[in-house]
Image: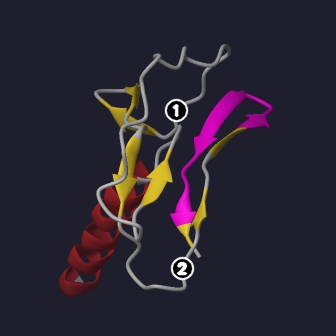
Amino acid sequence: MKYRKLLLLLAMVLITAVNEGNAQIFVRVRPERPHYERVVAPSPRHVWIDEEWEIRGGKYVFVGGRWVEPPHARMIWVPGHWRNRPRGLVWVPGHWK
C-alpha cells in the first residue's frame, strides 16, 4: 500500500513536470520582428532560416536570420508561423522535413 502511494506521487510529479515543459505562451499582438541584413551564405549547402521565435524567460525572443546546414542533404526547412488560437497567437516553430 505504501509502495503504491509513493509510485502514484512520483507519477504525478513527473506528469506535472512534463506539462510545464510543454507550456505555450499566447500573445494578443505579434512581437515586432527586428530589421537585419542577410549575409552571404557560408556554403552552397546552407539554408537561410528567416523568422524564428523561442520562449525565453516567459516571453518570445527573436532568433531568426541565420544560415544553417541541413542535417541531411535532402531535407528542407519548413518555416515557423504564428497560429491563431482562442487564447491568442502562438508561435509554431519551424522544422526540418
> Was residue 86 drawn as part of the magenta stretch in this picture?
yes
- Locate residue 32 relative to residue 10 in the image: left or right: right
> Where, quadrant-wise, is the N terminus in this rendering?
bottom left
Q: Residue at x 36, y 38 (%)?
A: 39
Q: How many marks?
A: 2
Q: Label 2, label 1: how many angstroms apart (C-alpha)?
A: 29 Å
Magenta stretch, main secondary structure, is strand
Q: Considering only vertical position in the picture, is 37 above or below 71?
A: above
Q: Considering only vertical position in the picture, is 61 above or below 6?
A: above
Mark carried by residue 25: 1
Q: Quadrant of residue 54?
A: top left
- Locate residue 15 relative to residue 74 in the image: left or right: left
At label 1, counting other C-alpha atoms closer than 10 Å, the crowd grade (few under 14, some 14-19, many 20 or more) is some
> Where, quadrant-wise, is the C terminus in this rendering?
bottom right
The spot of residue 44 in percent (x, y) is: 41, 67
- Magenta residues span 83-95
Colour convention of the picture: secondary structure
Q: Earlier in the sequence, mark 2 or mark 1?
A: 1
Q: Quadrant of residue 68?
A: bottom left
The spot of residue 87 in percent (x, y) is: 72, 28
Asked whether disc 2 touches disc 1, contact meaning CB atoms under 8 Å apart, the reply is: no
Q: Residue at x 43, y 38 (%)?
A: 64
Q: Considering only vertical position in the picture, is 20 above or below 78?
A: above
Q: Residue at x 60, y 48 (%)?
A: 80
Q: Which residue is mark 2?
A: 75
